[in-house]
Amino acid sequence: MKRKIYTVSGFDCAVCAGKAERHIAKQEDVESARMDFTNNKLYINFKEEPWDCEKLRSVIAEVESDPLNIAEFTKEGANKKVKVFNKRMLFILIRIIAVVLISLINIFLLAKEDLTLVRTILYAVGIVLIGYDITWRVILHIKHKNNILDHNLLITIAAIGSFIISILEFNDHHVMPLGSINIAMDGGMEGVMVIALFQIGQIIESLATNKSKAAVMSAVELRVDTAQLVTPNGIETVTPEELRVGDEIIVTSGELIPIDGVVLSGEAYVDTSSLTGEFVPVLANESSQVFGGCLVKSGTINVRVSKKYEDSTVSKIIELISNGGEQKTKADEFIAKFARIYTPIVVGLAIVTFFVGGLISQDWPTWIHTGLEILVIGCPCAIVISVPLAFFSAIGLASKNGIVIKGANYLDKLLEMGVLITDKTGTLTHGSFEISKVVALSGTDDELLDYLYAAECLSKHPIGKAICHDIKTNDYANKLSDFNEIPGLGIEVLYGDKIVVAGGAKLLKEQGVEVPEVKDAGTVVFCAVDSELVGYVVLSDVIKDNAQPMVNLLHARGISICLLTGDKEQNAKEICNNLGIDKWYSELLPEDKMKYLVKEMNGTKKAVAFIGDGMNDAPSIIRSDIGIAMGGMGSDIAVENADIIIMNDDPAKVSDAIEIASKARNTSIFNIAFALAVKVLVYILAIIFGGESWMMYVAILADTGLTVLLVLNSLLLLYRKIKRKNA
């Protein structure tokens, strides 16, 4: 199976896009197809060789006549900004203006009884000019034996029906004086106005939808177009794609960092909010790691490139966000089914209303009007456009808050979460040891630390680095005449004229030194000088500030938490007791973590999430229902395989992600309920006032106006604030 992504724009509405998706999926050489109307992406899994763009265009043309722009998706294409107003909209606007001029001629210049035929012909020309594309789609559907019951058919019937009624003189012709000019008003105007107002609505819908897409993409806009490369001949401006690992670039105040790297020299305050959602600038100086897409607020830094652009954080996030609509949410699936059955119901309702009302009252002109109004009211665009857009906006909102969600379907899964399984080091803790306790058994604490610094100053082990992280190691290294690191046990050095041994209890016992039993949670490092124990220190992995809020917030949502760690039992027990974690399993190998993960998944019907950061967590991240990775210090393989990435390593953002998912679901439910309520209300009004000419305009407003309103409601989700409660 071969997967290919296309950029496809120009569909009239989400219903048309869905119809094309279903038609493509039925082709013999296609395994599956998914059209993301909101993001203009078409994902196709082919059984054999993928299609070129012309083949795809010809297949779509069998069911849709929309003038489409089709191209193979590229990362460069993903960075192109959405055009809010395009050529297609301009062409429709020109046709609308032409029809308005025709209508004005009829109203003001042809207000004579003997010119009724001329007016009728002009109105007919106007209807053809403004509505030929709508009717052509209906003809294509008939030609290709597709389901013709969609909004194109509804509007076509309403417009032609209104025009025919005027010809048959079901509506009166009126001539009204306006100063010295007579104004001709007749039923032909209604047929023109039905389509003209619908087309105006289409432009407004497209403007609102495109504006929404542009707002979402600008919210996650991280791309930098140029970089300042330092060369022997001076500074050269290049694209980020041209940079290679090891290149040196310079970034000054007010510029975005174009690519991941390490600071060689200089100092600057960097705004990392585009990645992490945190707006407090971070100081970056020599040896600091910096990421593409972050803004240098003040200062200048020289950066050595550490990754190719396609492997960098900024490139991956842009790709993840732009492809976030590939997977369907439950709401998307509901809308797809809804659109297929809703339109036939509307047509049936219009026919029943027409016949029942006409038979009872014998006022056929009035009930013909009412039936046509119901067809216009029934267009499903408001729902099928606004609901997917709500989930797309939610992905943008998550990105603004430092959370990358790889697919809209994971928003559904977040709401189904019942258990969160978490790793310890790097997830709940910082993953860096600090001395939490100093116990001198002979001499002073300072003397004990002095010997430990001497023993560990040349060590490459994380424990040695933790002990010596804030001292000048050269001062001690110059006083050493011998250094012997014993793997897995500790270190023996000759410091001046004293033999210093530092390490675990096993090493010191082998040296004939008796050590006491220490029950403190953490890693214990003993120190002996000339075979005499001088004391020990306890190193602990510091708990993150937001670990406790994460536990509190998830417990408030009824989600249980389980810790899986390779650390010893005592340490696991203490951290769980401190944070209030429900249960734990300790001293685990990666394969052991997988075993307990599967056990938890089999023990519940709800979704089970796993959050971790290391390479050893990747198998569990893949196996879980929802894989969550720490993106700041997490390993590439963990981030690559996760469904959700937390960019600033804040575990409490798991709750924020659930809150965002909840807002997306609530917005989509509101849009569906509000749209149906308005349509039912206007349907009732059509039954009561069906004979009134203004009712047709109300019907159009209930379609296009409602669509614009709900699209804007979905867009507002992008600007919502995430507030943590009970943390």
Image (cartoon, rainbow, N blue to C red):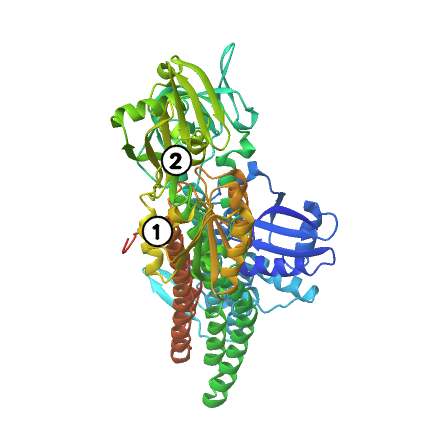
Percent position (x, y) of residue 298? 32, 24
The residue positioned 32% from the left and 38% from the top of the image is 279
Mark nearest the camera among 1 and 2 is 2
Residue 65 visible? The answer is no
The residue positioned 70% from the left and 45% from the top of the image is 52
- Residue that carries the numbered disc 1 in the rendered image: 550
Percent position (x, y) of residue 358? 49, 85
Disc 1 to disc 2, C-alpha distance: 20 Å
Closer to the camera, 611 or 327? Answer: 611
Q: Residues within 10 Å of mark 2 (few under 14, many from 20)?
A: some
Q: Earlier in the sequence, mark 1 or mark 2?
A: 2
Percent position (x, y) of residue 542? 34, 40
What amino acid type is highlighted by mark number 1? Met
Which residue is farthest left?
Answer: 444
Q: Residues within 10 Å of mark 1 (few under 14, many from 20)?
A: many
Q: Is residue 523 left or right of residue 643?
A: left
Compared to residue 696, the image places residue 564 above or below, namely above
User: In which image quadrant can residue 428 be found?
Assistant: top left
User: In which image quadrant can residue 283 be found?
Assistant: top left
Q: Which mark is residue 432?
A: 2
Closer to the camera, 7 or 575? Answer: 575
Dot 1: element: helix
User: In which image quadrant can residue 251 be found?
Assistant: top left
Compared to residue 684, the image places residue 129 above or below, namely above
Dot 2: element: strand
Residue 510 visible? The answer is yes
What amino acid type is highlighted by mark number 2? Ser
Percent position (x, y) of residue 86? 51, 45
Which residue is farthest front?
Answer: 512
